[in-house]
Amino acid sequence: MKSATAGSSAAAALLVALAAPAFAEGELNLYSARHYDTDEALYADFTKATGITINRIEAGADELFERIRAEGANSPADVFLTVDAGRLWRAADAGILAPVDSEILERRIPAYLQHPDNLWFSFSQRARIFFYDKETVDAPPLTYEALAEPRYEGMICARSSSNIYMLSLMASMIAHHGEEAALAWAEGLNNNLARAPQGGDTDQLRGIVSGECPIAVSNTYYFARALATNVDGLTEGVEKIGWVFPNQADRGTHVNVSGAGVLRNAPNRENAVKFLEYLASDQAQKYFSDGNYEYPAVPGVGLGDAVAQLGLFRSDNLNLSALGENQAAAVRLYDQAGYR
């Protein structure tokens, strides 16, 4: 799913674009940490609908974040688009984003999926849920808390503690239960691992197919992608995998997001706001679900076929700013628990 502009080519594109930044009316300078080929339709349709040309620079979120800070008031960037609420919080906390006053965004994006002061908005959701081997697991965990129960010893595969998705999950546990309980949870989860944390979410799901991991923690879109396309080492065994949306009987399932904000020094601010409003449109929301197998952020938008196979769920309405606010504590508690 990665585009050809990722990695070294992204760095080259960055240098070229910065050598001749565009400030003209009718343009938008987008700094994007999303690298999905399917997003091309998003940008093309926005330009077709508005006449606004998008000058896109793609790189890693941290690289773009530091670039924006270094450029300061001279930055050509209008919009910062990235994945994970923790990264959005970091941008807001650094003071590089400006509040957006938009009735469209306020009406369409649920409150928990936007910054309390409108510094960023979410446009797609990735639920972090449990997948399990239907042939060997009779009673999968139904809550995040249950992952730490002794009955799941040696059964769970998950990513490393440094992964942003695992940090955000821990941050949500801190928000709901406090640090003492979150530490005990991390210790229990660490004791229940089937193997040392390694690889990405697809690797956790492959572990179910190979028989190494009876239970895996993963974002939904990795599995939905295997339902829709051929993912080596996963699609051929997808029929043996079941899934659980955790905590449906209480607070709801933890979600993470893709989101964006308008830069404080945006030279094309009006166009930037139009772009965010476009991302909240039904058309763009369908692209997120059809093209990259994510859940829309806007309620009521139809799901893509693969996402629909996973089904609807009740999400945790914790404001996602809490994921960033508790990120440093999440790192510390994972370290204390010995979870690597």
Image (cartoon, rainbow, N blue to C red):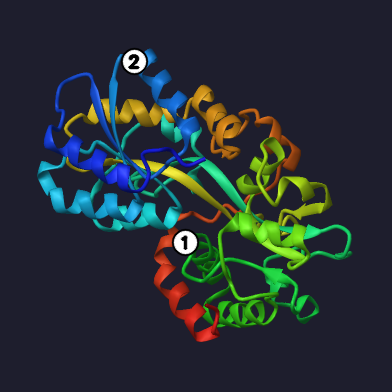
The answer to whether any part of residue 143 appears in the image is yes
Residue 57, position as x, y percentages in the image: 29, 38
Is residue 107 something that shows in the picture?
Answer: no
| Residue 45, image quadrant | top left
Query: What residue lies at 47% left-to-right and 61% top-to-bottom?
Result: 164
Amino acid under disc 1: Ile
Residue position marked by numbered label 2 in the rendering: 50
Q: Which residue is mark 1?
A: 164
In this rendering, the answer to whether 139 lies above or below 36 is below
Q: Position of residue 150 (x, y in %)?
A: 76, 81
2 or 1: tag closer to the N-terminus: 2
Marks 2 and 1 in Cβ contact (< 8 Å): no
- Callout 1: SS: helix
Residue at (68%, 71%) from the top-left corner?
145
Does residue 6 appear to the left or right of 243 in the view shown? left
The residue located at (35%, 51%) in the rendering is: 60
Q: CA distance from mark 2 to mark 1?
A: 35 Å
Q: Horizontally, is 330 left or right of 269 in the view?
A: right
Label 2 CA crowd tier, 10 Å (few <14, some 14–19, many 20+) = few
Percent x, y for residue 334? 51, 78
**Disc 2 secondary structure class:** helix
Q: Residue at x 32, y 34 (%)?
A: 101
- Name the amino acid, label 2: Thr
Q: Is residue 336 above or below residue 162?
A: below
Q: Quadrant of residue 186?
A: bottom right
The answer to whether residue 287 is above or below residue 312 is above
Q: Position of residue 312 (x, y in %)?
A: 71, 41
Instruction: Tell me if 23 is positioned left or right of 294 in this view.
Output: left
Between 98 and 20, which is closer to the camera in this rendering? 20
